[in-house]
Image (spheres, rainbow, N blue to C red):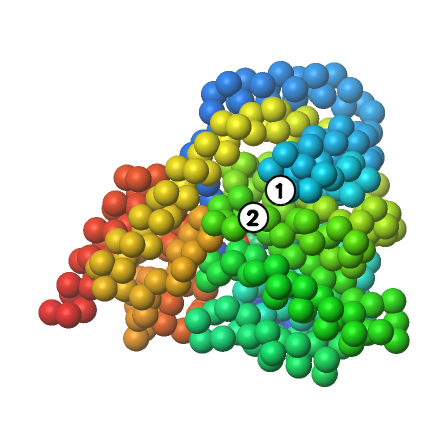
Amino acid sequence: MTGIDDLPIRDELRGKSPYGAPQLDVPVRLNTNENPYPLPEPLVARIAERVAEAARNLNRYPDRDAVELRTGLARYLSRTAGLEVGVAQVWAANGSNEVLQQLLQTFGGPGRTAIGFEPSYSMHALISRGTGTGWISGPRNADFTIDVDAARKAIAEQRPDVVFITSPNNPTGTAVGAETVLALHDAAQDARADTAGALVVVDEAYGEFSHRPSLLPLIEGRPRLVLSRTMSKAFGAAGLRLGYLAADPAVVDAVQLVRLPYHLSAITQATALAALEHTDTLLGYVEALKAERDRLVSELRTIGCQVTDSDANFVQFGRFEDAHAAWQGLLDRGVLVRDNGVPGWLRVTAGTPAENDAFLDAVRELMKEKSA
Ligand SMILES: *Cc1c(COP(=O)(O)O)cnc(C)c1O
């Protein structure tokens, strides 16, 4: 039988595994940070209308520049994130993963490097590898905040072309302050002062769930700072595949050099536009999830778990001598959480109140068993 390694694949892909959380069929699935609420029926009906309209023109290529959608996204950011944003500052793609890939194709690539502060979103390293960009694993403090001095030092020594800052961070839930972003941004520009500087990508996939305001205003006057967002989490539309960035118009112009023509289908654009029409309802679900997230944090602490403060729609909890055994123990009780490979810790996504109750009951049983 032919295996992957018998094929003439690139050397850096040999022996590697694809990204993927187990998609197991269990009663309570709290492992991929999805929004537990299905889209409301009026929105489903509006999507059907908008998609039918788009279907009448499917013999034509879609709007390559997705101007109507980008205008809607710019309006949403302007309304919610504390800065007036124009359509020229916004770009959209199939999930923020594609946005990140386009950024790495443009600003990373062979002979270049990207740094992230781990544990963090593993796709940053994987997309770097996929685009031939070298990956540098930067440090964090024991409490999972970014160690600013150590990060500055790593940037000065390694001189990366791209810096990833995830806020709130996945899988820890930790938000990053504006002063930290600015310190790392300035360190990255200093380190690359001999060139045109370095690109700093703030991945704000969970921005809407944070106790803190968006970091979006930091892009003003900083053409090398990019903010990335997604409709997968707060908008409850992971199946849609729609991510976007906000940055200086020059960054939007630059990614045009690598984006595939007509990358965003007319169906995707129509569906995302329908979702934007229902922003207020969807943000109402976000408020409910934030309350559930805060309840998970306090109840897990009452049970006796250690919990990392969370600004996201998930919670990192522990500490377990054997996190994988604890993961299995919860799965045996019908609850699927995520083992991100952070020693001692697991991650649970905030679900519906009933799902969260089932999860908390399972943890209580597990802890009782442990102390028995
Ligand atoms: C979920 C997630 C994304 C979203 O990816 P999409 O491709 O938009 O679904 C991006 N960044 C982080 C840190 C995430 O956790």
| Number of numbered discs overlaid on the protein picture | 2
Residue 302 drawn at (x, y percent): 22, 58
Q: Residue at x 35, y 44 (%)?
A: 292
Query: Helix or strand or loop: what does disc 2 sit on?
Result: loop
Q: In the picture provided, is 20 more to the left or to the right than 268? A: left
- Asked whether 356 or 155 is in front, the reply is 155
Q: Residue at x 47, y 20 (%)?
A: 41
Q: Residue at x 63, y 46 (%)?
A: 229
Q: In the picture provided, is 360 more to the left or to the right than 345? A: left
Q: Is residue 177 above or below residue 85?
A: below
- Pointer 1 local density, CA inside 10 Å: few below 14, some 14–19, many at least 20: some
Q: In the picture provided, is 324 more to the left or to the right than 90? A: left
Task: Find residue 232 and name its label.
Answer: none
Residue 208 visible somewhere in the drawing: yes
Real-space Cα distance between discs 1 and 2?
7 Å
Query: Helix or strand or loop: what does disc 1 sit on?
Result: loop
Tag 1: amino acid: Ala
Task: Find residue 213 and name its label.
Answer: 2
Quarter of the image where one finds residue 107 = bottom right
Which tag, 1 or 2, sits closer to the chain's start? 1
Tag 2: amino acid: Pro
Q: Which residue is mark 1?
A: 81
Q: Is residue 155 above or below residue 326?
A: below
Q: Is residue 257 above or below residue 15?
A: above
Q: Is residue 165 above or below residue 282?
A: below
Residue 249 drawn at (x, y percent): 83, 46
Whether ligand 1 has any atom under 8 Å from the Cβ at mark 1 is answered as no
The extreme left residue here reads 372
For the residues labelled 1 and 2, say whether their Cβ atoms are less than 8 Å apart.
Answer: yes
Residue 18 visible somewhere in the drawing: no
